[in-house]
Image (cartoon, helix red, strand yellow):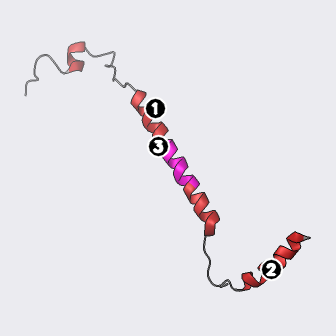
């Protein structure tokens, strides 16, 4: 019974709202903040995982080790 009484008190307040004005409200802010926190956590996790990567390119199997490292005789022009 008290819920219906509360709704009857809120109906006059709803008429004061401008029908031409649309705002995201609190729910829009909460959703936006949750997305921002999620992106921040994903970026933090990505940085941590990328820090663990130790990438060293292996030389091709058909080339000599001296040619792959860039050392050895200079090329003649």
* Residue occupied by mark 1: 49
Q: Quadrant of the C terminus?
A: top left
Where residue 7 appears, as percent x and y from the top left, is: 82, 75
61 over 39 or under it: above or below: above
Residue ranking furthest to the front: 2
- Which residue appears at 73% of the width and 81% of the height? 14
- Mark 3 against mark 2, which lies toward the viewer? 2
Where residue 8 appears, as percent x and y from the top left, is: 84, 79
Q: Are marks 3 and 1 in contact (CB under 8 Å)?
A: no
* Residue occupied by mark 2: 9
Where residue 67 appears, as percent x and y from the top left, is: 21, 18
Residue ranking furthest to the right: 1
Q: Quadrant of the N terminus?
A: bottom right
- Which residue appears at 34% of the width and 15% of the height? 61
- Which residue appears at 61% of the width and 64% of the height? 28
The span shown in magenta is 34-43
Q: Residues within 10 Å of mark 1 (few under 14, many from 20)?
A: few
The disc label shown at residue 6, or none: none
Spatial distance from mark 3 to mark 1, Cα to Cα?
10 Å
* Residue occupied by mark 3: 43
Marks 3 and 1, the one that precedes in the sequence: 3
Q: Residues within 10 Å of mark 3 (few under 14, many from 20)?
A: few
Quadrant of residue 20 in the image?
bottom right
Q: Are marks 1 and 2 in contact (CB under 8 Å)?
A: no
Where residue 76 appears, as percent x and y from the top left, is: 8, 24
- Which residue appears at 73% of the width and 82% of the height? 13
Front residue (pair 55, 2): 2
Element class at badge 1: helix
Element class at badge 3: helix
């Amino acid at each position: 019974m008290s819920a219906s009484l509360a709704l009857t008190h809120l109906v006059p307040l709803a008429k004061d709202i401008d029908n031409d004005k649309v705002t995201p409200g609190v729910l829009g802010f909460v959703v936006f903040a949750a997305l921002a926190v999620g992106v921040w956590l994903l970026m933090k996790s990505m940085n941590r995982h990328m820090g663990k990567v130790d990438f060293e390119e292996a030389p091709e199997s058909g080339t000599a080790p001296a040619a792959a490292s860039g050392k050895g005789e200079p090329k003649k022009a």
